[in-house]
Amino acid sequence: MKKSILFTCALLATFSLTAFGFINWNDTKTNHRESFCAKAVNSESLLVKEFVELEDADFFYDYGTRFRGVKKSTLENAKSITDFLPYKETAPVVSYYSVSVIIIKNDEQTDIRESGDDAVLTEGQMKLLRSSDYSTNFLIRAEFQGRNNHTGFIEDNYFTPHLTIVPEKEAEYIPGKEALLDYLKENNKENTLKLNKDKLQPAKLYFTVTKKGKIDKINLDRTSGYPEIDKAMIKLITNAPGKWAPAENTMGEKVDQELVISFGMIGC
């Protein structure tokens, strides 16, 4: 009987050590959230501390143009979509069915569009692109037959790159992009503690850097899910300590440019 009990205890001890070793080994493979969950069961105070750090680290900040920028000067000289789209996007195409230039407003496709049946821009497409002002958002919807890089077969496909028209020289926060993001993070830190990930949303804050280097036309396009954070972000960008260098056109003249601050969850 004693031998049986001793054997059982030894077996349990071995299993415990093995399990502990597995957990420690696995902990090096997991991400911060998983390793936090494994630790939180041991301490309520640790749970609160780690939750705060995790959620604060997950709060996203960035700023720039709404979509990938393309210079207005490039569009004014473009004869084909290949003149302003990266080669990797058009390389798989064997033949086109249709190519449409579609203006986007309020993040929605409009009826302001021109269509053709090839990569070469039609007169209507060139006129639409050249007459569009700075900060205009548009997409190219191209339906085509292309080669599948994985199978090698020719098949139907499409692409829809979204683009924003930008000046020759874009507006710039003089202390630098990272300085602006650090300023936003530091001064919004208290608001981003203990956030509910299910409630947090990807937010967009539009603003214009005027030709005089001033901030104007601040507009919250979508909420982060937390009104106090939205209000704080509007106040912070309004009162940012650094100066802005305005955008310039090809003639070196100062022009307005719209920029977007993304914050909250990562998203479109």
Image (cartoon, helix red, strand yellow):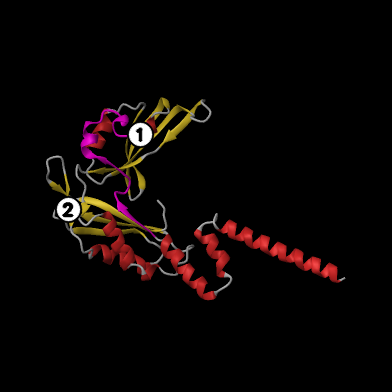
The kind of residue on which mark 1 rests is Ser
Asked if residue 66 lies in the magenta stretch, the reply is yes
Front one among 111 and 249: 249
Q: Residue furthest right?
A: 1
Image x and y of residue 181, in percent: 30, 59
* Picture residue at 32% right of the left edge, 30% below the top: 82
Mark 2 to mark 1 CA distance (whole Å): 35 Å
Q: Residue furthest bottom?
A: 45
Q: Is residue 203 above or below residue 254?
A: below
Q: Secondary structure at mark 1?
A: strand
Check contact, mark 2 vs mark 1: CB within 8 A.
no
Q: Earlier in the sequence, mark 2 or mark 1?
A: 1
Image x and y of residue 27, in percent: 56, 59
Magenta span covers which residues? 60-87
Dividing the picture into quadrants, the one containing residue 231 is bottom left
Front one among 157 and 69: 69
Q: Determine if residue 219 is in view.
A: no
Residue count near mark 2 (Cα–Cα under 10 Å), binned few <14, some 14–19, many ≥20: some
Asked if residue 74 lies in the magenta stretch, the reply is yes
Task: Residue under label 1, please give it.
Answer: 100
* Picture residue at 48% right of the left edge, 68% below the top: 50
The disc label shown at residue 184, or none:
none
Q: Is residue 200 above or below residue 69?
A: below
Q: Quadrant of the N terminus?
A: bottom right
* Picture residue at 37% right of the left edge, 67% below the top: 227
Task: Residue under label 2, please give it.
Answer: 245
Image x and y of residue 234, in percent: 28, 64
